[in-house]
Image (tube, helix red, strand yellow):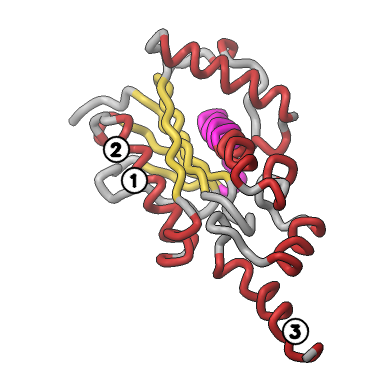
Amino acid sequence: MNKLKYIFGIDEAGRGPLAGPVAVGVACVPVDFDWRLIPGVNDSKKVTEKNRFAIFLRAKMLRKQKIINFSVSLVGASVIDRIGITQAVALGISRSLHKLALDPSTADVRLDGLLEAPHEYKHQKTIIKGDQKEKAIGLASIVAKVTRDRYMVRTASRYPQYHFGIHKGYGTLVHRNLIKKIGMSALHRKTFCRNLTEKKLVKKKVLR
């Protein structure tokens, strides 16, 4: 039996937005990793945007030094619409783990919430509020969040009318009103926006 060498933290960012991909992060650290090398790791929602980016850069540096590793997979809106958000997240988990290309038998996998790794990862544990309790999960949530936010900022120039760089695709009042007014873009999750677009169609029928 292979000895466990790594802790894999797994978390996602962007499950609920109306537009953009869901991002799934996997952080891989040695079992004896000294977390003082990346201070401030916590649930991404409890870390400021500035500090998230600093932690992300620090993680990239440690990855370059081959001290840790991480991967993030983005699963787009069209896939989310086709297979549903739960299966889209599962697909993202599989993709991110595949990128790391490590022996599943050497990994102690820790997942946030109700997430689950593929069955070949025999040593896995789902932890409620794991992004707050397990630093490996917290780091996964941060690299996923930063990667997704940067993607949405880059994409904003293609769809300037939606202001994706500000709300990152989440269902803010401004964003919902824009969808009602001008409809959806290719970046929107149609299954998530259905109520908004249906209301728009009903309103148009009444006006006629």
Q: Is residue 123 above or below residue 202?
A: above
77 displayed left or right of 160 = left
Q: Look at the numbered disc 3 and give the secondary structure of its residue.
A: helix
Q: Residue 137: where, in percent of width, then height?
A: 53, 35
In the picture, the quarter occupied by the C terminus is: bottom right
Residue type at mark 2: give it.
His
Residue type at mark 1: give it.
Ser
Disc 3: which residue: 204
Marks 2 and 3 sit apart, C-alpha to C-alpha, by 47 Å
In the picture, the quarter occupied by the N terminus is: top left
Q: Note whether residue 192 is visible.
A: yes
Report the residue at 71% width, 65% height from top.
182
Q: Nearer the viewer's eye, disc 1 or disc 3?
A: 3
In the rendered image, residue 60 lying in the magenta stretch gets the answer no
Q: Image quarter for residue 183?
A: bottom right
139 displayed left or right of 3 = right
Report the residue at 63% width, 48% height from top.
159
Q: Look at the numbered disc 1 and give the secondary structure of its residue.
A: helix
Magenta span: predominant SS is helix
| Magenta highlight range | 128-147
Residue type at mark 3: give it.
Lys
Disc 2: which residue: 98
Disc 1: which residue: 94
Q: Residue furthest front?
A: 208
Q: Note whether residue 131 is visible.
A: no
**N-terminal-most mark, 1 or 3:** 1
Q: Are marks 1 and 2 in contact (CB under 8 Å)?
A: yes
